[in-house]
Structures are given as C-alpha cells and as structure tokens.
Image (spheres, rainbow, N blue to C red):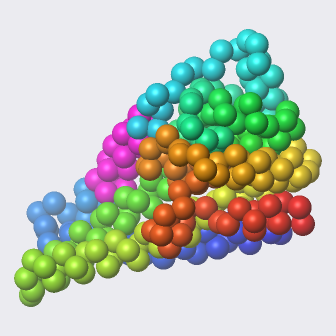
Amino acid sequence: MRNTQLKLRMAFVGFVLFALYFAAALFFSAMFPSIGLLPILALSIVVLPAAQYKFGKWMALRGTEEMPNEGQYREIHQMTESLSRDMGLDKPKLVVQDMGVPNAFATGRKGAGVVCVSNELIQLLERDELEGVIAHELAHLNNRDTITMILGQSVGMIVSYAVFFFVRDDNNFLVAYAAMMVAQLLTTILVMAISRYREYVADDDARQYIGTGDPLARALEKISRGAEGRESQVDETVSALCILNTDRSLMQKLFASHPPTEKRIEKLRH
C-alpha cells in the first residue's frame, strides 16, 4: 500500500509536469507554425532527452572501472545476479570507483543499466547490508528512474524557455530572464519531489526483494556516518543518482533530491 501511494504521488506530479510541457509545446508550435506541433513534441520529448541521457551516462561513469568477477568482488556479482533474476532484470554491468565517501548509484536504462559501487562502501558494509544497497540500485533500474528524471529535466528546460519567449514579447530581456528563472525554479521543485518519492519506492522495493528492511537501514546509517568529515569526489550532477546525497549545502537542503536519511531508516524499519 505504501509503495502504491508513493507511485500515485509521483504520477500526480508527473501529470502536472506533462501539462506544463504540453502547454509549452503548444506555445512553440504557435510561435513557429511552419514547424508544427508534432516535430516540436518529438524534438523536446525524444531527441533532447536522448542527448541528455547519453551525455549524463558518460558523465556519471567517468573515472569508474569495470568490477572484476573475482576476489572480494565475486560475491557482489553473485548477489547482483540473484537479485536481478528475482526482479526480472538483465544483470547490469558492475563498476567500482573511489568516491571519497561510501556510496553507490545506478544509471542507464532497464536492460542496459550500470551499477557503480564505491570501494569505500565495499570496505564499510557487511554482506547483507551491501545486498540491501544493491537491491535499492536495481530497483531504480527496474522502475526506469533514470529515464524519468531525465524527462523531468527536459520538461523543465522546455517550460522555462517557453516562459522566456512568452514574457519577452512585451518586456525587456531582464524581465523575461527573471521569469524564466522562476519557471525553472518551480519545475525543479516538482522534479526534486519525484526524485524524493523514487528513493522511498526503491527502498521499499529493496525491502521486498531481500525480505527485510533492516539491512538497508543499517547500511544507510553506516553510509551517513562514514560520509561525515569526508569530501565526496562525485560530480555534483551524479549526486542525485547516489543512494545517499552527501551534499549538505543550503541549496541542497532547499532542493533535496533525497528524503531525510532518518525518515528513510524509519520507514524501512516500520
């Protein structure tokens, strides 16, 4: 039930974003009648997100190394293969990276995903805790969360430019630019709301597949403590993909991509 409620909330926020996107597309089709609505829709919902997906995946995987299927990593491959089979997923590619902090993230699409685990995380967690983290990342791939977030970002870009050109007709550049920034701010709030919901859903999915939420809850506690006083080497654009966003800046608190860790732990143990 909890999972269903979260997905309904995501669907509602997604509907609001789509309504804004469609209004922006209609505006651009009226602005450029020779192009028409369908090409504009195709450009903004297919071409632009595809380009963002390719670039974003490349950015996320810079500095990673393929995880060998031997030694300390063999068990990670085995648990990933078992969980993937249970979820009906193709086993994703596994990579490792020195991130400066214990963390993990998933990127790519269902059927062509990549899970990155930091060496710091492998050293910190027990086997069942690491299994909880892997299950969480696989849930993101299974729910197509990377694609969802890219679409949300594309919609925000299209809406903000539509607002800019709409306001620019009767006002100067500075007024139009300010209006564009406000529109970008509002759409970002909606996209970040979806991001927070998807973390709760991935936590709940992980609990279902490993049978209990306690290992993932313990992992989140250790990751949070392990990140204290240490500087993350993960690019800011990748932080939203990680199981725990260690950014504590003021802007991150205002536009958090993740729910408070304490609430996630409480829900996992409820």
Q: Judge from the rendering whether residue 235 lies leftward or rightward of residue 201; answer left or right.
A: left
Q: Position of residue 229 (x, y in %)?
A: 61, 50
Q: Residue at x 48, y 46 (%)?
A: 238
Q: Nearer the viewer, residue 186 or 9?
A: 186
Q: Quadrant of residue 128?
A: top right
Check if residue 53 falls in the magenta segment. yes
Q: Judge from the rendering whether residue 235 lies leftward or rightward of residue 179; answer left or right.
A: right
Q: Residue at x 89, y 61 (%)?
A: 269
Q: Nearer the viewer, residue 72 or 229?
A: 229
Magenta span main SS = helix
Check if residue 59 falls in the magenta segment. no
Q: Nearer the viewer, residue 214 or 194?
A: 214
Please say whether residue 264 is visible from this viewpoint.
yes
Q: Residue at x 23, y 69 (%)?
A: 161
Q: Residue at x 28, y 53 (%)?
A: 43
Tell me if residue 231 comes above or below residue 186 in the rendering.
Answer: above
Marks counted in the figure total: 0
Q: Quadrant of residue 188?
A: bottom left
Please say whether residue 14 is visible from this viewpoint.
no
Q: Quadrant of residue 6?
A: bottom right
Q: Quadrant of the C terminus?
A: bottom right
Q: Position of residue 203 (x, y in %)?
A: 75, 55
Q: Judge from the rendering whether residue 25 lies leftward or rightward of residue 75; answer left or right.
A: left
Tell me if residue 116 comes above or below residue 150 in the rendering.
Answer: above
Q: Judge from the rendering whether residue 215 lies leftward or rightward of residue 99; answer left or right.
A: right
Q: Position of residue 58 (x, y in %)?
A: 41, 34
Q: Nearer the viewer, residue 42 or 72?
A: 72
Q: Quadrant of the N terminus?
A: bottom right
Q: Position of residue 137 (x, y in %)?
A: 68, 43
Per the rendered image, the range of residues in magenta is 42-58
